[in-house]
Image (spheres, rainbow, N blue to C red):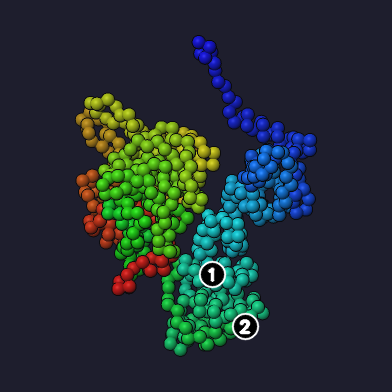
């Protein structure tokens, strides 16, 4: 009886913020400090308990010390290669959760966060550097990312450099002229560099040599490693014409660097195979036999529309979800042909042309719902072998660099037939139907216009703006920060139309809009792709793939957003509409053009 009078109360996050605020106001009272940290230019008094709670490095240090002393208290004075000024900024962050980053302190804070194993602070540094990257500092940011083990920033900086190498944006910078010889080789030998022609690489070599000629660089090695045309002037008219253009152009061609390159070209007779530069966006398709194909659907070259099969996965899986993040292709879940669902995660690396097993998903299913953002994969839901949705409420996060899974707060109103997309740190869970249907005999099934949003940084779910039109089994994608909801079905709510459904149109939530969703009347879903529609997008393209009807087994039709309407993708016809394959999952993968070229058998080239 007494237990019935008990009530539990909480002040929520207000209590935690008050405690932290109080500790911050008291941190400079030495009487409350029980530790000392030695730094490069002095020392700082600290509270060991709070420092250990906010910094994994000190937690491990103090726990190890406690074990070593068999429980006896002893004040540690660790020595860190950090300045007092930087350490005070980090202490402020531990107490308040806030930090001000600028061009003056970013390197020191990044180095300290790496040393102290403070992953959250390190991620804030990465976000800051990604926000300020430009042609003048991209090479320095890449070096910082590599030095302090920031793989997401390494990938981002490399992509930025490759895309901005055209028009000599990067070559004009002081950072480029100050590169070491080895870093220059690494840069100019990359497959992914966007160049108008190999003349851009020749220009870069001359610019660098004009600055570094006194360092006695190995010019012959640079020429043979970096240039992809024939090095034999006598037998290569194309390259010879390029050199003639150099002689007729303005400085720096009439310069010591140009003469050094010419001399090196005359001395060497080594022929380097011509490998295409730049990147290519292709469609990755998973079939029902466990194979994954790359289809060149967006280019107009020799292999437009052709497909190539990737090497077999580590463990053959049918009907996995395909997802791209960090330059890798991930195959999530799936199962065997006996219908047994698995929780495997496999990663394909285009540069090594190989698959790697990663940490398995927390649950097993076919075709889990999945999106990716900022080096993380987010999954929920899933199907059985017959593609019937399972009532899986898990919401899980996978760090592709740490190779770890983490459980997040579940979706408050889990629905089947919902769509999912991500933009600007928010995951949108869109439409669908409740798992508990209306009573038997009801002429309608329920379809919702609900949208729920997961705020990744705060790790909370909030209600989003309602759709203009209720729908389930829609497709959703992020294009340039805007969320597109495409297609889907809802019942025709009319007594004479029992059992009939309507294919819905396209809606968009613009990132700058404060008015909710907007109907896109010119983007009505094509009837040829109205069933099992999949939407894929990047900053350049929005592509949808679907079927004419629910009975067609193999045929998938592919359309691309052109202006205010949908147009056919000519390059997709040879495999997507041929009826020779049944594809279950798709993803858009960007990879070096040379890597795609290398996948083709030699007899097809």
Res. 469 in view: no
CB contact under 8 Å: marks 1 and 2: no
Quadrant holding the C terminus: bottom left
Indicate the quadrant where residue 438 lies: top left
Point 63% across, 29% down: residue: 15
Q: Position of residue 513 (x, y in %)?
A: 48, 42
Q: Nearer the viewer, residue 262 or 27?
A: 27
Indicate whether 116 appears above or below 137: above
Position in image of residue 305 (x %, y %): 31, 63
Location of residue 562 by image quarter: bottom left
Residue 448 placement: quadrant: top left
Residue drawn at (64%, 33%) of the image: 17
Number of residues whose C-alpha sits closer than 10 Å to that of mark 2, classed few (under 14), some (14–19) or many (20 or more) = some
- Mark 1, secondary structure of its residue: helix
Mark carried by residue 256: 2
**Nearer to the camera, 420 or 604:** 604
List the single residue furthest toward the bottom.
Answer: 234
The residue tagged with tag 2: helix, strand or loop? helix
List x then y, in percent, for residue 542.
39, 53
Question: Which is more N-terminal, label 2 or label 1?
Answer: 1
Distance Cα–Cα, label 1 vs label 2: 23 Å
Residue 228 appears in the figure: yes
- In depth, the one of 322 and 549 nearer the eye is 322
Front position among marks 1 and 2: 1
Q: Which residue is mark 1?
A: 186
- In the picture shown, does residue 330 fall above or below 252? above
């Amino acid at each position: 009886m007494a237990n019935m009078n008990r009530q539990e109360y909480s002040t929520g996050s207000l209590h935690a913020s008050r405690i932290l605020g109080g500790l911050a106001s008291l941190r400079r009272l030495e009487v409350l400090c029980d530790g000392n940290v030695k730094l490069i230019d002095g020392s700082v008094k600290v509270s060991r308990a709070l420092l250990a709670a906010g910094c994994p490095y000190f937690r491990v240090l103090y726990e190890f010390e406690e074990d070593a002393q068999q429980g006896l208290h002893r004040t540690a004075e660790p020595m860190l290669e950090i300045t007092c000024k930087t350490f005070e900024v980090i202490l402020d962050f531990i107490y308040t959760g806030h930090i001000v980053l600028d061009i003056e302190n970013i390197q020191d804070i990044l180095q300290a966060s790496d040393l102290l194993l403070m992953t959250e602070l390190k991620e804030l540094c990465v976000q800051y550097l990604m926000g300020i990257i430009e042609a003048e500092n991209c090479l320095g940011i890449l070096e910082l990312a590599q030095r302090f083990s920031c793989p997401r920033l390494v990938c981002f900086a490399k992509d930025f450099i490759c895309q901005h190498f055209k028009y000599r944006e990067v070559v004009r910078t002081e950072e480029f002229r100050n590169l070491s010889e080895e870093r220059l080789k690494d840069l100019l030998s990359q497959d992914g560099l966007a160049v108008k022609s190999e003349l851009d690489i020749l220009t870069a070599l001359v610019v660098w040599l004009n600055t570094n000629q006194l360092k006695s660089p190995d010019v012959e090695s640079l020429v043979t490693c970096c240039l992809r045309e024939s090095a034999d002037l006598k037998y290569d008219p194309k390259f010879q014409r390029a050199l003639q253009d150099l002689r007729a152009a303005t400085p720096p061609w009439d310069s010591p660097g140009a003469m050094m390159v010419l001399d090196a070209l005359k001395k060497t007779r080594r022929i380097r195979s011509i490998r295409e530069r730049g990147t290519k966006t292709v469609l990755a398709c998973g079939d029902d036999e466990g194979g994954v194909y790359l289809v060149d659907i967006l280019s107009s070259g020799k292999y437009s529309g052709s497909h190539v099969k990737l090497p077999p996965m580590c463990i053959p899986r049918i009907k996995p979800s395909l997802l791209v993040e960090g330059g890798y292709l991930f195959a999530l879940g799936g199962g065997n042909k006996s219908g047994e669902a698995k929780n495997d995660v496999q990663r394909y690396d285009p540069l090594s042309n190989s698959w790697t097993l990663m940490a398995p998903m927390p649950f097993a299913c076919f075709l889990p719902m999945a999106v990716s953002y900022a080096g993380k994969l987010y999954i929920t839901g899933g199907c059985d072998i017959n593609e019937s949705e399972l009532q899986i409420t898990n919401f899980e996060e996978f760090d592709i660099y740490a190779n770890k899974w983490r459980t997040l707060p579940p979706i408050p109103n889990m629905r089947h037939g919902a769509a999912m997309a991500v933009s600007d740190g928010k995951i949108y869970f869109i439409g669908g139907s409740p798992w508990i249907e209306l009573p038997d005999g009801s002429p309608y099934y329920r379809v919702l216009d609900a949208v729920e949003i997961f705020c990744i940084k705060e790790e909370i779910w909030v209600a989003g703006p309602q759709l203009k039109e209720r729908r389930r089994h829609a497709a959703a994608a992020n294009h340039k920060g805007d969320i597109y909801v495409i297609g889907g079905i809802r019942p025709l709510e009319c007594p004479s139309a029992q059992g009939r459904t309507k294919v819905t149109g396209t809606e968009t939530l613009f990132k700058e809009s404060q008015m909710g969703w907007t109907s896109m009347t010119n983007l009505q879903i094509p009837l040829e792709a109205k069933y099992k529609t999949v939407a894929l997008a990047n900053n350049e393209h929005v592509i949808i793939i679907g079927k004419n009807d629910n009975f067609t087994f193999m045929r998938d039709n592919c359309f691309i957003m052109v202006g205010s309407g949908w147009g056919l993708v000519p390059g997709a016809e040879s495999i997507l509409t041929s009826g020779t394959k049944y594809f279950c999952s798709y993803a858009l993968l960007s990879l070096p053009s040379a890597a795609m070229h290398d996948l083709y058998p030699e007899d097809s080239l």
